[in-house]
Each structure stands twice: as structure tokens, then as C-alpha cells.
Image (cartoon, rainbow, N blue to C red):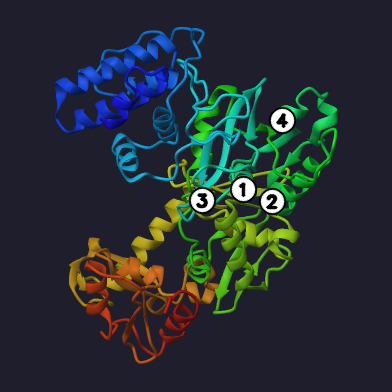
């Protein structure tokens, strides 16, 4: 409520609408129906007056009884340009940065460092004009803007804006330099760190720098060719090093102006083309660029490779690779041209995984992924949330909310699936040997036949014809209550003495750990001298321990 009271009566009406929307939605969830309706009605009235489509869309997602629907999005009227106070301006910045009402109130109480400063070195004592119905805290000029939070959670002291620029968008980096009252640092002293971070995040989104100019007041009167710092389009995902690009932009800035001074932290305007973002998506892109990335932890390379054994995976050129063997250091991969297989270092895959999760995207090229880049790229493309683009070939990892891509397999026709189901039924019938109930060969518990699976000890797709026909030895009965999945995923295996081995992942607890404890050391009912070679294969290629 503090955020709303700060903005009450100010000219930042759209910002107040956002606060009211957040407050009303929170109150509605807490059962405070009447206050919530009042907040949401006020937010709706402001949004309709300002033509704020984003606020109206969010209101439309709320329950019908919470707020009446808006049938049209009116035109945005001209703004009056009345000023915000410094305290209002700070609240506005927190709203635009995506903070909830509770977060805003907390940061106002604790003096959070994300308050905005003037880019002319005036400090917070003087505020800049703000649009009465503006969509952004900072709009044009050499004034304040948003700040980015790095992936470690630190808010960088450097202001930026995303603005519509013709049919495209533009990243405006505010200049650095000059003293700030009460601060040991100069204005926007982390300019270079922030610019590099923003370029990385734009690369993750497949952005192209169409052009770039120095945009500071002393040189705005010059024709654009005389203040250009990006002369031709730059495809960020194919740019070898973002740091090198940032330094190049800095060197170019230093040469601009009547008296080139070498200053590499001037206000610049980088015009962008970003897939999925139009000129009216400036606020959305700014908010997303300001937030820390959420790519999670890179998966374990060995675990990923073992999970792919026997599954055909396609390269970006359409060639089929199949992993047939995995050890601690290498993976053997077969192709149509190399049916016997070739060895690839696991560390090449590890490096690719780390690069993908660090950068968010990686070109499938020898320079980025090594001499087996086609195979490494195919492995990276199996990770949920990845999207592959062509010309150039790039694997991009989106946040978990991004729709996951379903990996295509070479054989998906109905006849193949029917054949597999028939073989499974026949093999299970053979292993049951006329019994209607039987024990699971791993946990020993007895189940009706419908709850048992004929589990191949060695992956069927990698068996020779002779092995595939060795029905009583190459498969066993495993229950559907965890044992089949644990064996297939490599959480358990069987040693040379016939005892079950369990792999306990770091931090594992709960029901899964209990089940693995119960299995560890049990005698496997399917282990014998004739089946031992298949268990040996499983330990070497699938078991995670």
C-alpha cells in the first residue's frame, strides 16, 4: 500500500495503475474482496484512459467478479509532462522493474539501492519530467532509466532504456561519469559491465544489432554517419566474443565528436531486431533484460549421454547419430558413414553444455564446439527447452516457461510401435512361464503379470540379432512400481555377484532414497552366468555410479 500512497496524485498514472493492479490482485487472493474491487476498478479506469493494453490484458485475466471487462482499448492521449518527486520516481522505477507491491514496500523501508539517479549528475534532489500516462519511467533524453540485475543477484549501477525506434526497438545506454552526491562511485560507473550483460541477454533472444550511434546531447546535431558506431548488422549469436564487441563499441565512441576524447562510455543508441518483439514491446523486453537469467544448472554430461544410448539423434543437417557405448571419458557414436562408430571425448560435450548454459545460446560450429560439433550440437538439442535455428545453426536454451520442443525420432511409424508392443507382450509371457503372478527380479515383491515389464538388460536397439533372440537371458521381469524406471535410468544395476547396486545422488532423500536403500544389496533373480554379460554392459554404459 505504501507504493500506491506514494504515487497517489502524481503524474505517473500508468505506473500507479500497475501498483493498483498488483495490490488488488493480492487482496483478491487474500479474500479481501471489496478493497480488491476498488483497487482493480481504479487500475482499470487509469488503464482505459491511458490506452494501456498490457494492464488491460492482465485485468482481463482476473475473475469476472473481481473486475468488469474492457471491450476496447482507447487511443493514448497526449501526456502533460508533469514532474515526479524523487521518491515517486524511485517507486516508479521499482514498478517498471517488475517488483510486486510487497517488494516495493520492503525496498522503500530498507533503502534498496535500485533508486534511480539523474544521468546529468544532479543526484536525486532534482527529478526529471515524466509522462502522465507514460509506459516507461525514462523516455528519451539523457535522463534516468532502468537497471539490470546480474545472474548473481547484484543490481548494476548503469541505466538503460528500451525504446521504440521506427519499426524496431533501440537499446539506449545512459552515459557514465560525473559525481553523485553521497556516493563513492561516479554516475553509471558499471556501464561496461551492464552493456556486456545486456548484449549477452540479447544474444540469447537471437537479436541483431541493425545499427548504432552515439546519442549524447553534444553530438546529436551531427548527421548520423558522423556518429555511427555500428556500420553493418551484427548477428549476436554468431559473434565470437561479446566482450570484444563491447570493447569495439567503446573504441568507436571515443572517436565521435568535434574533439574526440577517447570516452568509451557515452550515451549510445543500438537499434535492434529481436525475434518475437515488435516496436510496442519495449516495456516487455526492458523488463526481461533487467531480470537475472533462469537457465538452471547444466546437466551432467555422462548422465545425459547414457540416457541417449540407442536413441537416434539428428544433427542440424539431418544426419542420424546413435550412441552405442559410454565410458567415463569417451562415447562411441555410429553414423551411416561410420557404422562401426567413432569415439568422441565426453569433455567436448561437457564444454558444450557449460557454454550453452553460460551464454544461453551457442552456434553449432567447429570454432564453438570443436571438431565433433555436429554430434555435440545434436546432444545439446535434446535438452528440454532448447530450440534449434538454421542458417546459421544455433542451439538456444530458453527459460523453463518457454514451450518445450519435442525431440523427433527416426522411427515413429505405427507399425513399428505395434511390433514393439507385440514383442513386449510375447517376451513377458515367456518370462512368466505360464504364471499369472511373479516376483520382480530386482525388488523381489510379487505382482500380477500386468504390473511387470519385460525389461531388456542390454538396450534392445543395441543388441545383435543373436542377443535379441537370447530371450531368457537378455531380459528380466521388473515391476512398474519403480524398479523398471530405476534400472533403465541407471540408478540401479547388478554386479558380478548378482547383487543390486544403488546409486545415491547427492542430496537425495525421501521415498526415492528409501527405495534405493531397500534395493541395495538384494540378490537379483535374473542374474546367472548366461545373463552376466548383459549386466556387465549395463554397468559400463547405463549405471551412474
**N-term mark: 3 or 4:** 3
Horizontal arrangement in the rendering, residue 360 relative to residue 90 (left or right):
right
Q: CA distance from mark 3 to mark 4?
A: 25 Å
The residue lying toward the viewer, choosing from 160 and 466, is: 160
Task: For marks 2 and 4, give the CA distance.
Answer: 21 Å
Q: Are marks 3 and 4 in contact (CB under 8 Å)?
A: no
* Residue tagged 3: 150
Q: Foreground mark, 3 or 4?
A: 4
**Residue under the image location 28 percent in, 31 percent down:** 2
Quadrant in which the C terminus is drawn: bottom left
Quarter of the image for residue 285 reads top right
Instruction: Work out whether mark 3 precedes mark 2 in sequence or the reverse, and give the earlier one.
Output: 3
Task: Tell me the element at label 4.
Answer: loop
Q: Position of residue 134 (x, y in %)?
A: 48, 19
Q: Residue at x 68, y 69 (%)?
A: 339
Find disc 1 in the rendering and name its residue. Answer: 200
Q: CA distance from mark 1 to mark 4?
A: 22 Å
The residue carrying mark 2 is 242
Query: Foreground residue, 259 or 530?
Result: 259
Q: Which residue is mark 4?
A: 215
Q: Could you tell me how far apart the alpha carbons at marks 3 and 1 are, in whole angstroms?
A: 11 Å
Asked which secondary structure carries label 3, the reply is loop
Circle 3 Cα neighbour tier, 10 Å, few/some/many (<14 / 14–19 / ≥20): some
> Is residue 64 visible to us here?
no
Tell which circle, 3 or 1, labels the residue nearer the N-terminal end: 3
Amino acid at each position: 500500500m505504501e507504493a500506491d500512497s506514494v504515487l497517489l496524485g502524481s503524474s505517473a498514472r500508468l505506473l500507479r495503475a500497475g501498483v493498483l493492479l498488483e495490490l488488488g490482485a493480492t487482496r483478491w487472493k487474500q479474500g479481501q474482496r471489496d478493497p480488491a474491487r476498488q483497487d482493480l476498478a481504479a487500475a482499470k479506469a487509469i488503464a482505459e484512459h491511458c490506452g494501456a493494453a498490457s494492464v488491460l490484458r492482465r485485468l482481463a485475466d482476473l475473475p469476472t467478479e473481481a473486475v468488469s471487462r474492457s471491450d476496447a482499448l482507447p487511443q493514448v492521449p497526449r501526456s502533460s509532462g508533469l514532474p515526479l518527486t524523487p521518491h515517486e520516481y524511485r517507486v516508479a522505477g521499482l514498478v517498471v522493474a517488475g517488483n510486486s507491491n510487497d517488494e516495493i514496500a520492503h525496498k522503500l523501508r530498507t533503502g534498496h539501492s535500485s533508486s534511480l539517479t539523474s544521468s546529468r549528475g544532479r543526484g536525486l534532489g532534482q527529478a526529471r519530467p515524466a509522462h502522465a500516462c507514460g509506459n516507461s519511467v525514462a523516455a528519451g533524453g539523457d535522463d534516468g532509466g532502468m537497471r539490470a540485475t546480474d545472474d548473481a543477484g547484484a543490481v548494476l549501477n548503469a541505466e538503460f532504456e528500451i525504446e521504440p525506434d521506427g519499426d524496431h526497438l533501440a537499446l539506449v545506454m545512459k552515459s557514465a561519469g560525473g559525481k553523485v552526491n553521497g556516493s563513492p562511485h561516479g554516475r553509471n560507473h558499471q556501464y561496461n559491465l551492464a552493456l556486456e550483460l545486456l548484449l549477452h541477454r540479447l544474444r540469447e533472444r537471437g537479436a541483431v544489432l541493425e545499427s548504432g550511434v552515439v546519442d549524447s546531447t553534444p553530438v546529436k546535431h551531427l548527421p548520423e554517419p558522423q556518429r555511427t558506431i555500428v556500420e553493418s548488422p551484427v548477428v549476436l549469436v554468431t559473434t565470437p566474443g561479446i566482450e570484444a564487441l563491447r570493447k569495439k563499441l567503446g573504441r568507436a565512441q571515443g572517436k565521435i565528436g568535434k574533439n574526440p576524447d577517447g570516452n568509451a562510455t557515452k550515451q549510445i543508441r543500438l537499434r535492434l531486431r529481436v525475434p518475437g518483439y515488435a516496436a510496442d514491446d519495449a516495456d516487455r523486453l526492458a523488463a526481461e533484460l533487467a531480470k537475472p537469467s533462469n537457465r538452471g544448472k547444466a546437466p551432467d554430461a555422462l548422465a545425459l549421454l547414457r540416457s541417449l544410448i540407442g536413441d537416434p539423434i539428428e544433427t542440424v543437417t539431418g544426419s542420424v547419430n546413435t550412441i552405442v557405448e559410454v565410458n567415463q571419458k569417451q562415447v562411441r557414436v555410429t553414423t551411416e558413414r561410420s557404422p562401426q562408430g567413432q569415439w568422441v571425448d565426453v569433455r567436448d560435450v561437457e564444454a558444450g553444455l557449460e557454454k550453452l548454459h553460460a551464454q544461453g545460446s551457442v552456434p553449432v560450429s567447429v570454432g564453438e564446439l570443436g571438431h565433433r560439433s555436429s554430434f555435440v550440437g545434436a546432444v545439446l538439442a535434446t535438452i528440454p527447452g532448447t530450440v534449434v535455428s538454421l542458417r546459421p545453426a544455433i542451439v538456444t536454451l530458453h527459460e523453463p516457461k518457454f514451450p518445450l520442443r519435442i525431440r523427433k525420432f527416426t522411427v515413429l511409424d505405427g507399425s513399428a510401435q505395434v511390433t514393439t508392443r507385440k514383442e513386449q507382450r510375447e517376451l513377458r509371457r515367456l518370462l512368466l512361464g505360464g504364471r499369472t503372478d511373479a516376483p520382480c527380479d530386482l525388488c523381489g515383491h510379487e505382482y500380477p503379470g500386468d504390473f511387470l515389464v519385460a525389461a531388456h538388460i542390454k538396450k534392445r536397439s543395441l543388441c545383435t540379432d543373436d542377443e535379441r533372440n537370447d530371450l531368457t537371458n537378455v531380459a528380466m521381469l521388473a515391476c512398474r512400481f519403480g524398479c523398471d524406471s530405476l534400472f533403465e535410468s541407471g540408478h540401479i544395476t547388478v554386479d558380478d555377484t548378482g547383487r543390486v547396486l544403488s546409486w545415491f545422488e547427492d542430496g537425495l532423500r525421501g521415498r526415492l532414497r528409501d527405495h534405493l536403500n531397500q534395493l541395495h544389496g538384494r540378490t537379483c533373480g535374473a542374474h546367472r552366468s548366461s545373463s552376466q554379460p548383459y549386466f556387465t554392459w549395463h554397468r559400463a554404459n547405463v549405471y551412474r555410479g
